[in-house]
Structure formats: C-alpha cells, structure tokens
Image: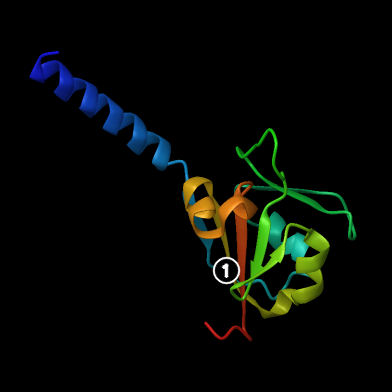
Amino acid sequence: MKTSVKVLYALAFITIISSCASTEGTTNQPKDFSSYTDLAAALRSIGGLQVSGTGDNIIVTLRGMSTIKLNTQPLYVVNNIPVGNAYSDANSMVNPSEITSIRVLRGASATTIYGEDGNAGVIVIKTKVSTN
C-alpha cells in the first residue's frame, strides 16, 4: 500500500474515533438542587437522563446508552463512594437540599474509571457534606 493511502486511512480512522469520543464523556450540571423534594426530581432536571416511575420504583437510564448482556442501570457514586446500581440505595443516602452537583459519565470515561460497574453510565452526586 502506498504511503499516501496509508495516511488517508489513518486520517479517516482518527476522524471516526474523534467523532465517537465527542458523544461520550461527562455532563456537568451546576445548578441549585435545594428546591427538589427527592433525588428523582433532581435527576429529572438533568439533560440526557430518562427517569420513570414513582416512589422507590424509579428507573433511571442514560439516553443513548444500552447494553446487551450487562446491567442497564447506571452506577451511583455519592461523595466519591460507589453505592451500586439501585436508585433506592442512592436515594436513601442523599438529601436533595444538600446536593451541590450531579455529573453524568458515559461511555469510555465511565468504564475506564469504574470498570464494568460503569458500563451503563455513572451518576456522580456531590453533596455539601462531601469531603472532596
């Protein structure tokens, strides 16, 4: 293969990778969460999340994220502590009026940091009592 063709293939590959990478990553939503009555209401205000159900029967999914064989619920991380993929566990740990930020990790950035636990995305919640 000629050098110019190899260069074109390399450029095409880089373009494809960069366009895919732009759909992954983090979504940081700085806002005032003090008016929300529960975690589900706060999560409903975050773009890119789909929140359905009521009470403790809440199902949260990241739009555009799907998996065939692994968990479809995002991992919840509260004040740098992974609490699992159950909304009810995260809800029991978080007072919505204490939330300072909610950040959504998707794709490679989520699995790089949290492994298979983050394959369906990660919802990182910081509260006022956070040490970091």
Q: Residue furthest top?
A: 1
- State the residue at coordinates (71%, 44%): 72
x, y percent for residue 120: 64, 47
Q: Nearer the viewer, residue 109 or 31?
A: 109
x, y percent for residue 13: 29, 28
Q: Nearer the viewer, residue 3 or 29?
A: 3
Which of the 4 image quarters holds residue 114? bottom right
Badge 1 is on which residue? 31
Q: Residue furthest left?
A: 3
Task: Please state if 111 lies on the left or on the right of 1 as rendered.
Answer: right
Task: Please state if 69 lies on the left or on the right of 111 as rendered.
Answer: right
Q: How many numbered circles does the render carry?
A: 1
x, y percent for residue 54: 88, 55
- State the residue at coordinates (15%, 24%): 7
- State the residue at coordinates (65%, 37%): 66
Quarter of the image for the N terminus: give it: top left
Query: In the image, is residue 100 above or below residue 122?
Result: below
Query: In the image, is residue 85 above or below residue 12?
Result: below
- State the residue at coordinates (71%, 55%): 44
x, y percent for residue 98: 68, 80
Q: Amino acid at mark 1?
A: Lys
Which of the 4 image quarters holds residue 34? bottom right
